[in-house]
Amino acid sequence: MVIVVVCLIGMMAGSCFGIFFSGEDSGTGMTMRDAAREINQEYNEKIEKIKTDNPYDKLILSGSRATWPEILSIYAVKTTSDQSDGQEVASMNDMKLELLRKVFWDMNSISYRVERHTKGSGKDKTTVVYLYITISHKTTDEMADQYHFNADQKKQLAELLDEKYRSLWSSVLYGIGTGDGEIVTIALSQLGNVGGQPYWSWYGFTSRVEWCACFVSWCANECGYIDAGVIPSFSLCSDGSDWFKARSQWQERDYEPCAGDIIFFDWGGDGVPDHVGIVEKTEGGTVYTVEGNSGDACRENSYPVGDARIYGYGVPMYS
């Protein structure tokens, strides 16, 4: 029986499902989380370079990136079933990082344009420079066609993307499962999305607003926490902080938060919260967060515990 189990595990690790083993270091010094983090950084740097190279008065960011489970599913099927050079995907190394990077950029693209709008005439003439950055991505079906997947490969792809593997993807990519970390998983899955349209439009706004609170509310809704009364639906940071305070679910800035806590910021130091995010984890005296509308994008950030910019924390009663 033991031999059978070992053989089954070996067969799974050598198939496209080996991707679910890639969250741990197999001896190469690199995990899938490391690889995804490195490519995320490259993606962010490309956007920042466009902004730096094209001075502007107003920035308009729009679009979204493919999710990492989608990217990794394409990568896993393509890499393991390559007839000329098939490889397992349970481990990560420099060569496989390059394969993953190629899939990422085959699937995602960043484009931009600059427009100058002139108003008035004579002494009242003014020119405003708009920088438009658009993020776009191909669907998994489009990628399957681009890579000429056959029927069996498409079947493997559909299986990897089945909702029943959601917790496994969370473990591979973020080192967490469901439960208290579920809202963190949802938030992390949105990294790289820009402009906030999915979040502020879900909330009911017809045009862009400052969308950090809409993002937190959207993530909470995806987990069912709004209907359960665990986290409120709010678009104003002060409404969110007041909700937690009224229920004695509030901690001040010197608190060491847990994954899933809601972090509120006071940039101006005037005692009024004006930004909000979700705590990913606290480690070594540093709070790691996922925030919407951070530079008009969904990004990971970090702050020292007790940082003066932190207004306080809402502590949801997840159980």
Image (cartoon, rainbow, N blue to C red):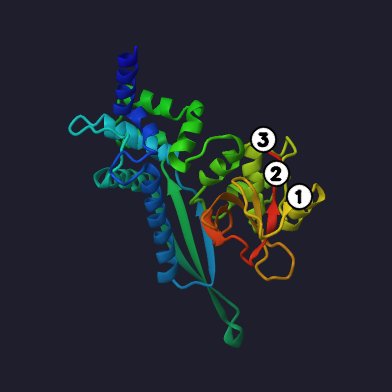
Measure the C-alpha gap from mark 1 to mark 2.
Answer: 8 Å
Q: Please identify the residue farthest to the top as the structure is shown.
A: 1
Question: Which amino acid is tagged 1?
Answer: Phe
Question: Which amino acid is tagged 2?
Answer: Pro
Mark nearer the N terminus (1 vs 2): 1
Q: Which residue is mark 1?
A: 244
Q: Please identify the residue farthest to the right as the structure is shown.
A: 246
Mark 2 secondary-structure assignment = loop
Neighbour tally class for label 2: few under 14, some 14-19, many 20 plus, Cα within 10 Å: some
Instruction: Name the front one of labels 3 and 2.
Output: 2
Mark nearer the N terminus (3 vs 2): 3
201 lies above or below 287: above
Q: Which residue is mark 2?
A: 316
Q: Residue, x 75% and y 58% (percent of image)?
A: 238
Quadrant (top left, top right, bottom left, bottom right) of the N terminus: top left
Mark 1 secondary-structure assignment = helix
Mark 3 secondary-structure assignment = loop
- Where is residue 93 drawn, in percent x and y? 27, 44
Residue 67 visible within the image: no
